[in-house]
Amino acid sequence: MLSLNRYQWTVLLAAWLGWGFDIFDGLLFNFVAPNCVPTLLGLTIGTPAAKEATLLWTGILTSVLLVGWAVGGILFGKLADQIGRTRTLLLTIILYALGTASCAAAPNIWVLALCRAVASFGIGGEWAAGATMVAEVVPDDKRVEAGALLYTAAPAGLLLATFLNLQVAGVFLKSSPETSWRYVFLCGLIPAAAALFVRVFVKEPERWQNVSARQKPPAIAELFEPRYLPFTLSGFLMAVTALITWWSSSAFIPLVASGLAGAEAAAQNLAKPETQALIESWKATASNSFNVGGLLGTLFTIPAAKYLGRRSMFSLYFILSAAALLLTFGLELPPTVRLYLYFPIGLTVFGIFGSFTYYLPELFPTRLRATGAGFCYNIGRIVAAGGPFLVGYVAGQGTNSLQSALGTLFWVGFVPIAGLLFIPLVIETRGQALAD
């Protein structure tokens, strides 16, 4: 990686900032949901009714995010092949920053859902533009390292979201949970700085400029032609398995941590401010465990992909993901132990995504690269959208929402096991150069 020139590092930094802030904006809602949802529904925060409603609406709004993410990813992926990677990256960052910040002014749950949908279009579109741009700019022998390094922005974005939520809701405004979530959403404007960086310092990759000038614009229908269909299936099946697993488990980290902290606070008979502080602290512990695990897991895809190959790498991560989820949610464990077991979940369930930033661009030629990568990575979110909705719906029906959530999340562990059935369809790309 040290052999990259200044411009290649600039492109990598621009894409890293775009993706990190993408995840930052996308996941802010998960942190504020226990305070935001009850407030907008007129319920008292912390009551059983509020907890059940939060589980249900977290599932619904996460599913809305994923559907919008999928639509934005497909449309902006195609746009990136038409107008360029840099222009598309700039547009998507601005869109998700404004959409997230507007959530702060939501007067009811329906307006919040609309603002989340607007943000989701930009969130979905950013990945294809950034990942494709990095893959096309760096040398072939550094593509795996650059792609994995790019994806470390995701846990970094979540760490930033965790930190800001803790400071706003757990320190400065811990006595005002009914309003603190609005200030957290306003932090969604921070990515605007990344958009300015992209506008000033990043130009279009030469590879795309050369190809776009002499070949016809891409069409999504081409992905289903006989010559490209095996590649499309390979990318889609791996992505959809990882997406269902990630979103079904990660979306409820703050809710599980809040439930565990609430039970602990009740056992210790803590006052409301101390209870709120404990809840925010445990949410941060669980989220940080997950994010640090994800950061390391992302980096581990480098040796796994280079020495084992893509097919064996996916198999390994799916097996370990299943083990981490089944153990964490299937065993009777002390609450603090369960919080820290989010580390191996992050290591596997989160870590596998470090591979998609280099694997999906490897599957398609330059004129179709962003379209294909964006489609494979994002169309699966429509299928994955059912995961958070189902988890939230089932868990929200129980009289004990925490135990219902834990029991439901246990079954999520069988998703990566099912993903192992698709491994024979994976196209191996180890050692291959990008096709023009």
Image: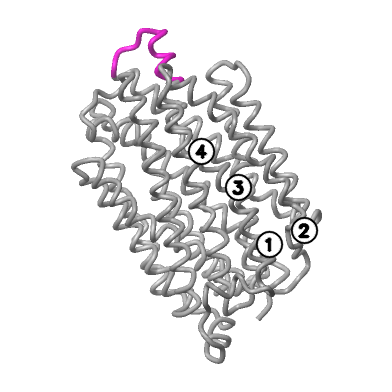
Q: Which mark is residue 306?
A: 2
The nearer-to-camera label among 2 and 3 is: 3
Measured Cα–Cα span from mark 4 to mark 3: 12 Å
Q: Earlier in the sequence, mark 2 or mark 3?
A: 3
Looking at the rendered structure, the kind of residue marked 3 is Ala
Q: Check contact, mark 1 vs mark 4: CB within 8 A.
A: no
Residue 152 vs residue 82: left or right? right
Q: Earlier in the sequence, mark 1 or mark 4?
A: 1
Measured Cα–Cα span from mark 2 to mark 3: 20 Å
Give the class, few, some or many, for how many residues have Cα within 10 Å of label 4's Cα (few <14, many ≥20). many
At mark 2, the secondary structure is helix
Measured Cα–Cα span from mark 4 to mark 2: 28 Å
Q: Earlier in the sequence, mark 4 or mark 3?
A: 3
Q: Quadrant of the N terminus?
A: bottom right
Looking at the rendered structure, the kind of residue marked 2 is Lys
At mark 3, the secondary structure is helix
* Range of residues picked out in magenta: 260-272
Give the class, few, some or many, for how many residues have Cα within 10 Å of label 2's Cα (few <14, many ≥20). some
Q: Which residue is mark 3?
A: 242
Q: Earlier in the sequence, mark 1 or mark 2?
A: 1
Q: Nearer the viewer, residue 159 or 368?
A: 368
Residue 287 vs residue 145: left or right? left
The nearer-to-camera label among 1 and 4 is: 4
The nearer-to-camera label among 4 and 2 is: 4
Q: Which residue is mark 1?
A: 144
Residue 365 lies, with reference to residue 28, above or below; the image says below
Q: Position of residue 194 (x, y in %)?
A: 40, 62
Give the class, few, some or many, for how many residues have Cα within 10 Å of label 1's Cα (few <14, many ≥20). many
Q: Which mark is residue 250?
A: 4
